[in-house]
């Protein structure tokens, strides 16, 4: 991202919000994404809500929800269960 990109201000504003987000935040990235591979570490370093969460790397490409849909559903269900004090 450089100042020449039209969405720089919006992206910086989004990071300002994310850097204050302390609710549970789980990252789910893929093992074969040529676009955003390694992005999980950026979120985990900058978003407080990621601390202590069970982050995952799943099998798939850039469209992880299409490549590993059942695993994504399980991850979201488990996050919701933990947020509501249930086992999951």
Image (cartoon, grey):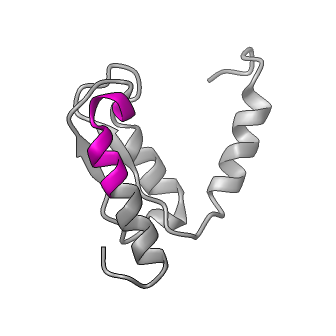
Vertical order, 21 against 11 (above or below): below
Magenta span contains residue 34: no
Vertical order, 1 against 69 (above or below): above
Q: Residue 32 in the image: x percent, y percent? A: 24, 26
**Residue found 45% across the figure and 63% down from its top:** 50
Q: Is residue 6 left or right of residue 83?
A: right
Q: Quadrant of residue 67?
A: top left
Quarter of the picture containing the C terminus is bottom left
Vertical order, 2 against 23 (above or below): above
Residue nearest the viewer, comparing 87 with 35? 87
Magenta span contains residue 70: yes
The number of callouts visible is 0
Point out the stretch of residues depicted in magenta.
Answer: 64-74
Residue nearest the viewer, comparing 66 with 61? 66
**Residue found 62% across the figure and 63% down from its top:** 21
**Residue found 51% across the figure and 66% down from its top:** 49
Q: Is residue 80 left or right of residue 10?
A: left
Q: Quadrant of residue 69?
A: top left
Quarter of the picture containing the N terminus is top right
Vertical order, 80 against 42 (above or below): below
Q: Residue 72 in the image: x percent, y percent? A: 34, 47
Residue nearest the viewer, comparing 67 with 16? 67
Judged from this view, the residue extending furthest toward the top is: 4
Q: Residue 44 in the image: x percent, y percent? A: 43, 55
Residue nearest the viewer, comparing 80 with 39? 80
**Residue found 31% across the figure and 56% down from its top:** 74
Give the main secondary structure, helix, strand or loop, of the magenta stretch.
Answer: helix
């Amino acid at each position: 991202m450089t100042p020449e990109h039209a969405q720089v201000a919006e992206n910086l504003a989004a990071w300002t919000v994310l850097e204050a987000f302390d609710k549970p935040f789980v990252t789910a990235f893929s093992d074969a994404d040529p676009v955003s591979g390694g992005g999980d570490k950026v979120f985990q370093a900058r978003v407080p809500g990621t601390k202590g969460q069970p982050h995952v790397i799943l099998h798939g490409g850039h469209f992880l929800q299409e490549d590993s849909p059942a695993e994504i559903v399980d991850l979201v269900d488990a996050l919701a269960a933990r947020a509501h004090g249930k086992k999951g």
